Image (cartoon, grey):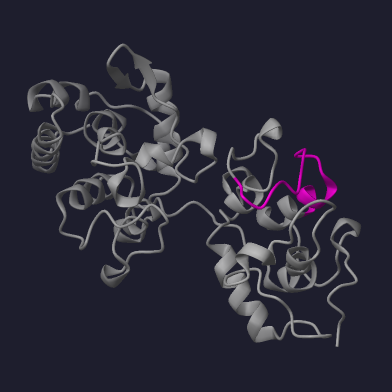
Amino acid sequence: MKITSFKLAMLTAAGLILASCGQEAPSPQSALSEASISVPDTPKGLDYAFYKEAIEPIFIRPRGGYIGSDAACVACHTSQANAPLGLQPPTLEGDRVFWTEAQSRQNFENVAMLVNPSDPDRSRLLMAPLAPAAGGARHSGGIFWDNNNHSEYRLIAEWIASGSDSAGTSEVAEVDFDFFRSCVQPIFVNPIENAMPCAECHGGEFAVEPPANAYWTEEQSRQAYEDLVYLIDPGRPDSSRFLHKPLHPNAGGDLMHNGGRRWFSKDDPERRALEDWVKGDASGSQCPPALQFDFPPRS
């Protein structure tokens, strides 16, 4: 693998970023010696040595707080939290917080799923923390970059661009709207025993109440669908908060969910049917038994 002026410049920039966080930055010379070794068969032709030296430290960078844009990426995006980025929980040794080589390799595999070397600026890894006014997407973790000239953004974008020109985005499953409208939306107003309906807390977003004695209009369903898709990672049920939050912690669900638990096992028939939908394997208006409800009535 050739050492380009880009790599030298980016490694120098990475050193400045880490130094500003009070962390010891790798010297360009040491990083270059690693980056000069070609790593075969990396996802999308991405440079693993450069990732480990310059990109991965950004995910653990302290930002002065614990919520939103004040928190490090790893505060929310760990495999334990079933977040799309899926970083491994860091290793702790004394006052050191780091990833082992095996953990970094797994992080690299997960990060590669969120980048598009053929169009770096359309990579989910870049769009989520970018301000919507600058072309970014919704991100519950807040806005890290007001524009695409931020040093972190540019560093990551140039790394993505150094991958294979023929590598695009990972294929995204289609989460069918008709199935949502017919089979998924009624869940939100049909609680299980001793639990609140989803609409009790989420009525202002994806769980809007239906009209009196009628079904939702298509416009209402479209809006609910758009709100819910924000909580879904298409094709990846285990990374979708929609399926993670209502699952009991003993079955791998989130530790906190004020609305209680709808499922106490990943094998719950209702949850399995929803998994099929998130995977892109369920479509149309014919509902499986676990997703057949009498309320609200069809008009």
Q: Residue at x 73, y 69 (%)?
A: 185
Note whether 157 is above or below 178 in the view shown: above
Residue 153 spot, x, y in % from top left:
22, 52
Q: Is residue 278 visible?
A: yes
Depth order, front residue of 189/145: 189
Hey, which residue is sitting farthest front in the picture? Answer: 194
Given residues 186 and 176, the one toward you in this image is: 186
- Res 120 quadrant in image: bottom left
Q: Which residues are magenta?
A: 257-273
Check if residue 261 falls in the magenta segment. Answer: yes
Q: Quadrant of residue 56?
A: top left
| Residue 138, image x, y percentages | 41, 63
Is 236 one of the magenta-colored residues? Answer: no
Q: Is residue 175 visible?
A: no
Residue 74 to residue 137: above or below: above
Q: Position of residue 114 (x, y in %)?
A: 42, 49
Give the side of residue 214 with respect to residue 53, left or right: right
| Image quarter (top left, top right, bottom left or bottom right) of the C terminus | bottom right
Tell me residue 122's x, y (percent): 35, 61
Please give the name of the residue rendered at 31% of the width and 38% of the height, measured from the top-left corner. 59
Q: Height in image: 65 above or below 166?
A: above
